[in-house]
Image (cartoon, grey):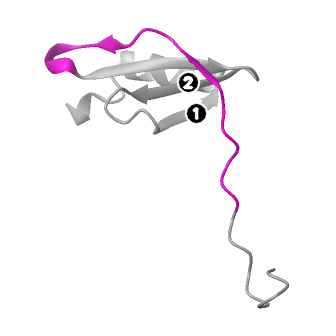
């Protein structure tokens, strides 16, 4: 709550995270993705086209996502 106006306080921006990105993986047409880890052990997947946007979760959750995609769970999107 903003003490001066009584309005709800604006949400604070998330703290910057230092991500150690691996070399980008590029397929045909320069569609490049990168994988990374932070100091807390969280895993990240991001596109080189939008470097400030990424998906983050535990290593186990992203491992399960990649395994499901490899098994065909996202084939309907192709």
| Tag 1 residue | 56
Magenta span contains residue 29: yes
| Tag 2 residue | 62
Kindly give the residue lying farthest to the front in the view shown. 4
Which residue lies at the image location 62% right of the left edge and 32% below the top edge? 57
Q: Is residue 17 left or right of residue 74?
A: right
Q: Report crowding for label 1: few under 14, some 14 to 19, many 20 or more residues within 10 A (C-alpha).
A: some
Q: Secondary structure at mark 2?
A: helix
Q: Quadrant of residue 37?
A: top right
Q: Quadrant of the C terminus?
A: top left
Nearer the N terminus, badge 1 or badge 2? 1
Looking at the picture, does residue 39 appear above or below residue 13? above
Image spot of residue 56 (x, y percent): 58, 33
Which residue lies at the image location 24% right of the left edge and 34% below the top edge? 76
Kindly give the residue lying farthest to the top in the view shown. 23
Kindly give the residue lying farthest to the right in the view shown. 3
Q: Which callout, 1 or 2, points to the residue nearer the camera?
A: 1
Looking at the picture, does residue 37 appear above or below residue 75? above
Image spot of residue 11 (x, y percent): 69, 65
Q: Report crowding for label 2: few under 14, some 14 to 19, many 20 or more residues within 10 A (C-alpha).
A: some
Q: Which residues are magenta?
A: 12-30
Q: Is residue 20 left or right of residue 76?
A: right
Image spot of residue 6 (x, y percent): 79, 90
Q: Secondary structure at mark 1?
A: strand
Which residue lies at the image location 37% right of the left edge and 15% below the top edge? 70
Q: Is residue 33 left or right of residue 22?
A: left
């Amino acid at each position: 709550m903003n003490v001066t106006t009584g309005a709800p306080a604006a949400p604070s921006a998330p703290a910057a995270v230092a991500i150690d990105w691996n070399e980008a993986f590029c397929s045909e047409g320069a569609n490049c993705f990168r994988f990374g880890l932070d100091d807390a052990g969280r895993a990240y997947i991001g596109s080189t086209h939008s470097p400030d946007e990424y998906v983050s979760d535990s290593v186990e959750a992203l491992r399960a996502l990649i395994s499901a995609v490899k098994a065909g769970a996202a084939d309907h999107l192709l």
